[in-house]
Image (tube, grey):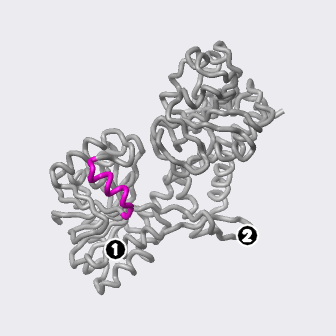
Amino acid sequence: MKFNKICVLGLGYIGLPTAATFAAHGIKVTGVDVNPLVIQTLKRGELHIHEPGLRQVVEQALQSGNLTVSSQPEEADAFLIAVPTPFYEDKFAEYEGRRYKLADMSAVIAATKAILPHLRKGNLVILESTSPPRTTLDLVRPILERSTLKAGSDFYLCYSPERVLPGQILRELVENARVIGGVTPESARAGHDLYATFVKGQIVETDATTSEMVKLMENTTRDVNIAIANEFARLAEKFGVDVWEAIRLANLHPRIDILNPGPGVGGHCISVDPWFFVETAPELTPLIYNARKVNDEQPRFVVSRVQEALGSLKDRRVAALGLAYKPDVDDLRESPAVEVVHLLQEQGAKVKAWEPFKPHAVLKGIHISQTLEDAIWQADTLLLLVRHAEFTRFDPVEIVAKTPARIAIDTVNGWDRDAWQRAGFQVHRLGDKKSSIASR
């Protein structure tokens, strides 16, 4: 199939890079977002998200005229839905005493309905948003078929998950393998033809539900592996072992690859996707459920260890370094670092946070400093929550001259303990037998 114009619904961390990449390869693209601030920002030639290399690609796409932005979809040859699928904060279900979260599919429903007036015979519709199994068949298809057109015969319908790493999105969009799940083989082939516009990695065709499950399996596997690393950190503290050394030694085995512990799991994928499995099959997912509970509880575990190190949190002045959910990105969604800050404040700590990738972020109830110096200059404790490369390069001798803090708490093994101790800091690491935050 040939595609002259496509419409991308959702201009976030996936939708905007995808739209700009298609535009860079000569396709006319209308990027749609319901947030007027996003549209206004892009029309000014500015970006609302940080991703290396994205600004140049978007600017060129806008200047060429191949990319335009709008608050409403238009007629096109293909429609890509790349909107958020978070879970509800206030809605839960329960199975045999296990309380679990429910997916909020309202954005997918709204985007699908927005396509209806523009859907024509021969069009291709692709859902990219991470979704519970059977969303394409049981949610998206019935809405689109209100047009009287039938999926698989009158128009093509696919599910194709994004599988990219923040910080490397533009490269991985092109180089990573792409899974195309169609409601029919013909739909999968149409999706293959569209992504072949720029994808250099392998493009694999399958059915829609398999494609949905592939994405969830990938992120759930990561979540379970992180959960066991976090439990290892708790065990190491109990037994007086340095978990970082133990992990290093265990990973010398050729078939072992233990991940690193930390303050928890965040982002829009790993911390959310496993719940989609639990929601759709709670009777089959006790392992997935319990891994999620371990990682969801990790911020509270970290705060308990900080409290042990400080004796009391009331009126302690803490500089929280990093708010992103992972190193070297500006994405604060579902970030465990944010949760740690909230919990510290609930215990009476006075926290100033510094997030170098998003210094102007606004988070309810959190003081975000505009500079590192402002965050640390009156602090009595430095708390490393994210392993940003910038933080790992800190010279403790320079830092000690800028702050009265003499306690450094490292939750991600980002600092050289000996160097910081030589500079005059009392250093505590999560999962470290030499740390005073180890269990007694």
Q: Position of residue 200 (x, y in %)?
A: 26, 48
- Point out the stretch of residues depicted in magenta: 34-45
| Residue 60 versus residue 245 in the image, above or below | below
Q: Residues within 10 Å of mark 1 (few under 14, many from 20)?
A: some
Q: Which mark is residue 96?
A: 2
In this view of the protein, can residue 22 be seen by the observer? yes
Where is mark 1, residue-wise? 114
| Residue 268 versus residue 359 in the image, above or below | below
Kindly indicate the quadrant of the structure image that contains residue 1: bottom left
Q: Position of residue 150 (x, y in %)?
A: 30, 82
Alpha carbon separation for disc pair 2 and 1: 39 Å
Q: Earlier in the sequence, mark 2 or mark 1?
A: 2
Kindly indicate the quadrant of the structure image that contains residue 272: bottom right
Residue 43 shown in magenta: yes
Residue at horizontal 71 percent and vertical 21 percent from the top:
426
Residue at horizontal 56 percent and vertical 37 percent from the top:
257
| Residue 141 versus residue 179 in the image, above or below | below
